[in-house]
Amino acid sequence: MEIEEGSETGKWEWEKTRRTLMVELKKMSSIAAPMVATTVLQYLLQVVSVMMVGHVNQLSLSSVAIATSLTNVSGFSILSGMAGGVETLCGQAFGAGQFENLGIYTYTAVLSLAMVCAPITIVWIFLDKILIHIGQDAAISIEARTYALWLIPALFGSAILKPLTRFFQTQSIISPMIISSLIVLCFHGITSWVLVFKLALGSVGTAIAFSLGTWLNVVILLCFVKFSSACEKTRVPFSKKAFLGFREFFGLAVPSAAMVCLKWWACEVFVLLAGLFPNPKLETSVLSICLTISTLHFTISYGLGSATSTRVSNELGAGNPKAVRFSVCTAMILAVTEALIVISILFGCRYVFGYAYTHDSAIVHYVSAMTPLLCASIFTDSLQAVLSGVAKGSGWQRVGAFVNLGAFYLVGIPVGVVLGFVVHLKAKGLWIGIVGGSIVQTIFLSIITARTDWKKQATMARERAFDAPS
């Protein structure tokens, strides 16, 4: 009889766990799927820009490629990373029911990011001198600077857009971002075509179109905040309280930016190093193709990481540590499943997908040889995106920043340099360095996540939410 009762209890517990898991899967997927769509639509803006100028001339294509890379590294990636502080503050405040604080935190973030834009703008103004100093062609450098100058309005627009998207994300209001991103993509395509070809503005035309599109996105989302009933509780007028949260915001935003940028910068270092090999065109081309594929996959990982951040921050703010554990486990299951699907497709097409980027058989063959390493990095990227989402949702970005610093600058880059230049594995050696850094990063973030006291984190989250600037 006792055995039967124990068996029934076990079945009941398993059924309860299964139902909870299914509910969490539904919640996670409802955020992750539209976030992936939004990220892909935003990523396509840069693809459209490159496609447009690619039909102008080789100088325009080269300058835009360099300018896009450098403005991402020195500007947009920093703003995007710093906006991770909003995910912690707004997500936990929403979970705790402190709805007015979301508006205050968002105002604080916009003001903070606008201040950061000022020194970035100075760097972009002197971009041509910087490029020439590091050995780039003068004509390409000058045109890259011109392109960057016309992106400055987009930079300041992003200072509003990045916190605004997190404002929606932490409330699980995703549809406005999809709609606005789709409208902006269509607007960008048409405007770029008119400015580049009809008005003969060349590469400058795509930069102007990108800046106009960024501000159009801001206007659409602000209109939704003002007129939608979904934002009724979190819509607050601007007040001096926004100026009182700088210290708290920067305390989360700076390490959050470090988490995002440290790996991004490490990958850019590897591309520059590839140019030092005996056959730089081949090695750089292969590495660039692998990074392009990795970046494209990141749009999926980023969506899942954003969903994880939202669910973790909301549940911590609500004081539900058990729900956080379920959210983390569910996100990891989704990440592994997604990674395995992508890896299977990529590995199965390893001998042909290189032709999507070039007709050079030597590059295609080289890419196919790199595919197993690319698959390994994609798998670790999926896991670390979720773990980084946990870090942002919990508010321990500082720890995550130190992990990324050690993983890529004490392990990844040194290993890549040794294997690439000393062992003569070239681009393959550099990519092994990326994989090695990603593995170290994933291991340490996994250990930290597994050892986290979620009850303590929930208490800290509620204290933070109820102790807003006043």
Image (spheres, rainbow, N blue to C red):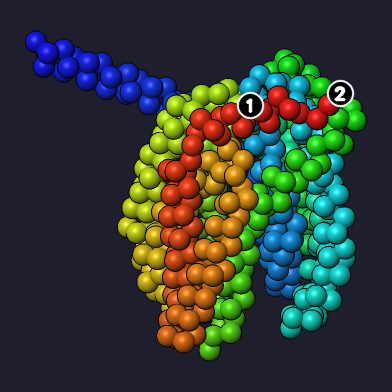
Q: Position of residue 128 (x, y in %)?
A: 83, 73
Q: What amino acid is found at the position of numbered circle 1 in the picture?
A: Arg
Residue at label 1?
462
Q: CA–CA distance between discs 2 and 1?
A: 24 Å
- Secondary structure under tag 2 reads loop
Residue 450 in which image quadrant: top left
Q: Earlier in the sequence, mark 2 or mark 1?
A: 2
Whole-percent x and y of residue 216? 79, 38
For image coordinates 45% across by 80% down, the residue present is 419
Could you tell me which quadrant the N terminus lies in? Answer: top left
Give percent across and percent down for residue 180.
Answer: 70, 34
- Residue that lies at the very extreme toward the left in this rendered image: 1
Q: Give the amino acid type for the residue marked by disc 2 in the picture.
A: Pro
Q: Which residue is mark 2?
A: 237
> Which residue is depicted at the point 47% across and 75% down?
415
Secondary structure state at the residue bearing disc 1: helix
**In this figure, what is the number of numbered marks?**
2
Q: Residue at x 22, y 20 (%)?
A: 10
In the rendered image, the quadrant that contains the C terminus is top right
454 in relation to 423, above or below: above
Residue 290 can be seen in this image: no
Residue drawn at (76%, 21%) of the image: 100
Left or right of 24 on screen, residue 207:
right
Whether 326 is drawn above or below 133: the answer is: above
Hey, which quadrant is residue 88 in on the image?
Answer: top right
